Image (cartoon, rainbow, N blue to C red):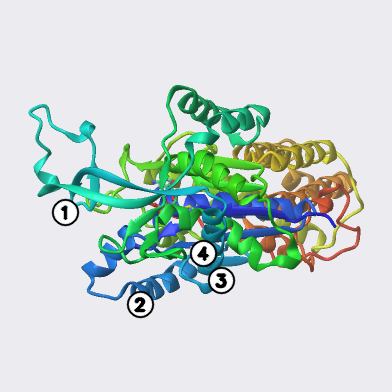
Amino acid sequence: MNKRFYITTAIDYVNGQPHLGHAYEKIIADVIARARRSLGQEVFFLTGLDEHGQKVQQAAQAERKNPQEYCDALAADWQAFARKLELTNDDFVRTTQPRHKAFVQAKLAQLHAAGHFYRATYTGYYSTKEETFLTEKDRLPDGTFDASYGEVVELKEDNYYFKLGAQQQWLIDTIEANPEFIAPSYRRNEVLGFLKNNKLEDLCISRPLARLNWGIPLPFDPEFVTYVWFDALVNYASIADAHPDLGLWPADIHVIGKDIVKFHAVYWPIMLKAMGLPLPKQILVHGWWQKDGAKIAKSTGNVVDPVAVINEWGVDALRFYVLRELDIGPDGNWTDAGFRSRYQAELANGLGNLVNRSLSMLKRYRNGIVPARANELAADAARAADETRALFRQSQLQAALQSIWGLVNRANKFVDETAPFKLAKDPAQAQRLDEVLYNLAETCRVLAVLLWPFLPGTATKIYAQLGLTGSPDKLAEATWGGLPAGHTIGEPAPLFPRKDV
Ligand code: MSP
């Protein structure tokens, strides 16, 4: 059996509403999932929510709600958000689901029995206000702790620890032997640098009930709940296990943000090794968005509301902008002006104008009937299709869009060069006009296929305007010559209405 391509996103904390950063990551994963399906692979795409731990417990308390009810209410919003983004996820995990909790507990019991954990007493300085242990590094120059920590007390606490330290060299060797394991390569180098220059501490995997109760109880000690990251990371495997007939594990790609690399590239591989499970093929790390050069933060009001953007401009415009503007890796900066300018130049004047004038002319000059095949743009279309196919296999989404827009621009230039509106006035040029119109209509068809993973709604509209039934969702259809002579197209209509601002 051809193994399914299994792709995941980070699971978001349910302590508020989704923002641009969450949208970005889910769009990346969705485009890769659709691209793989378009390449003909079977895909399983997982996203979901991280519902346990202190952050969520505190957010629920602030609203005087019981944490489960709090999560249930917000989970509905997040699932609606996934639909709004037109994600094609095959499952949606919530870490409070019994299928996940049972799996985590089974793995904890297995690891405990195999001697991967030990219990130890830790003495340290604890801020009750921040609910966190402080270290020597947190002390001010005068030896005290910042007032923001409130009262700091010396606390002695028992916990369970996972023996990470023993696997340090194994992990270095594994990362070095698998150059694709962490991408982009500078993230891989950072992880290797960290591992080679620091001694890996064992990981505390429990929280005493007295300090936190919103978590999965340790199966071997009811006085403790599981540390939220040990619970959350396991979602990738618990949900694979929940679909045993699909043979999902190991995952092909975990898409995550740069702030959580250590959890995925250090803790998770060592956890998997202890569980006896193979490692994921790749951890694909994206950068962070800012807005107007400053951190996105609710507290300062510096936010981009993805739902508002979608309502005003359409979901395809959002999907396009975030992937065209920012490669997977570096940090990006959202500006409303930048968004509008790409919308006008690349979507409305570029793609939208090409499709609209190509199909309108075919309608006007040839009654919407496709003329005989002509091949002037065939080589350009083939190049874009070949490049897109290769770039999809490497999750190079920005580069794929650049390649596709190479074809959009080429075709728009072709209209200017051949001036079909002039040809139409000269009956002696009828055959030339036929050729031009075929080239343009067929290019629009190929573009719909190449664009489908990015702009599913737009691609579907292009197919409908071409009068094609079926969906532009298979790259195999990007081969030149798919439009048969004599076929009647549908009704042209603007894809990206102009907005005058
Ligand atoms: N719950 C953990 C992840 C557990 S994965 C087993 C978590 N949640 S989060 O809600 O804080 O972040 C979820 C994802 O959103 C992370 O990958 C994070 O990097 C990403 N982003 C959060 N803010 C972001 C931006 N401003 N820009 C881009 N991505 C950002 O961490």
Image disc number at residue 129: 1
Q: Earlier in the sequence, mark 3 or mark 2?
A: 2
Amino acid type of the residue tagged 2 in the rendering: Glu
Task: Please report whichever mark, 4 or 3, sits nearer to the chain's N-terminal start.
Answer: 3
Residue behind mark 3? 99
Residue 274 left/right relative to 296: right
256 vs 492: above or below:
above
Q: Amino acid at mark 4?
A: Gln
Secondary structure beneath dot 1 equals: loop
Please tell me how many numbered marks the rendered image carries. Answer: 4
Q: Earlier in the sequence, mark 2 or mark 4?
A: 2
Residue 485 horizontal side relative to residue 160, left or right: right
Rendered residue at 59%/54% (across/down)? 8
Residue beneath the point at 41% across and 51% down: 205
Q: Position of residue 125 (x, y in %)?
A: 19, 43
As shown in the figure, which amino acid type bears the numbered disc 3?
Answer: Arg
